Amino acid sequence: MLKYIYCDEVDFTEGLALDLFVLCNKWLFKELEEECEDYLAESLTVENVLERAQLANKLEAGKLMGSVIQFIIEKMPELEKRGDLYKMPSVINVKVMFELKNRAEKAEILHKKSV
């Protein structure tokens, strides 16, 4: 964090981004918090999405939450096979279901317009 404060730069690693994100959220370093959130959202993997979903839920991180939801939808079969879908915070699963419902409704509307 000191490097960011004095030099306005950070060399992110996964662990550093997680730790800094929590600290910045607590101490209201909004600009650095956004950079951390961007990094965490862009580096989602099947292996880390559960941890990041829990963090996004705990810190009410909207951008990370949105990225997690999109990632879950894209990787649902893999996450189900790993058992991670069942470990997700319930609010995440509800948001995933609503997103899938919205997508289905939009697809149905487009289909009706094309007929």
Image: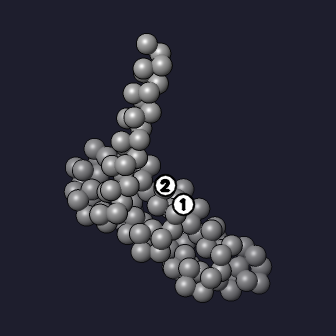
The location of residue 13, given as percent across then percent down, is 55, 69
User: Quarter of the image holding residue 87?
Assistant: bottom left
The residue where tag 1 is placed is 63
- In the image, 51 versus 88, the foreground residue is 88
Q: Is residue 12 visible?
A: no
| Mark count | 2
- In the image, 11 versus 69, the foreground residue is 69
Residue under the image location 48 percent in, 19 percent down: 113
Which amino acid type is shown beneath numbered disc 2? Ser
Using the image, determine if residue 23 lies above or below residue 94.
below
Which amino acid type is shown beneath numbered disc 1? Lys
> Label 1: how many residues lie within 10 Å, few (<14), some (14-19) or many (20+)?
some
Q: Is residue 54 visible?
A: yes
Element on which disc 1 rests: helix
The location of residue 8, given as percent across then percent down, is 76, 76
The residue where tag 2 is placed is 67
The location of residue 14, given as percent across then percent down, is 50, 68
Using the image, determine if residue 17 lies above or below residue 6.
above
Residue under the image location 65 percent in, 80 percent down: 29
Residue under the image location 77 percent in, 79 percent down: 7
In the rendered view, does 88 fall on the left or right side of 60? left
Q: Tags 1 and 2 in contact by the CB under 8 Å rule?
A: yes
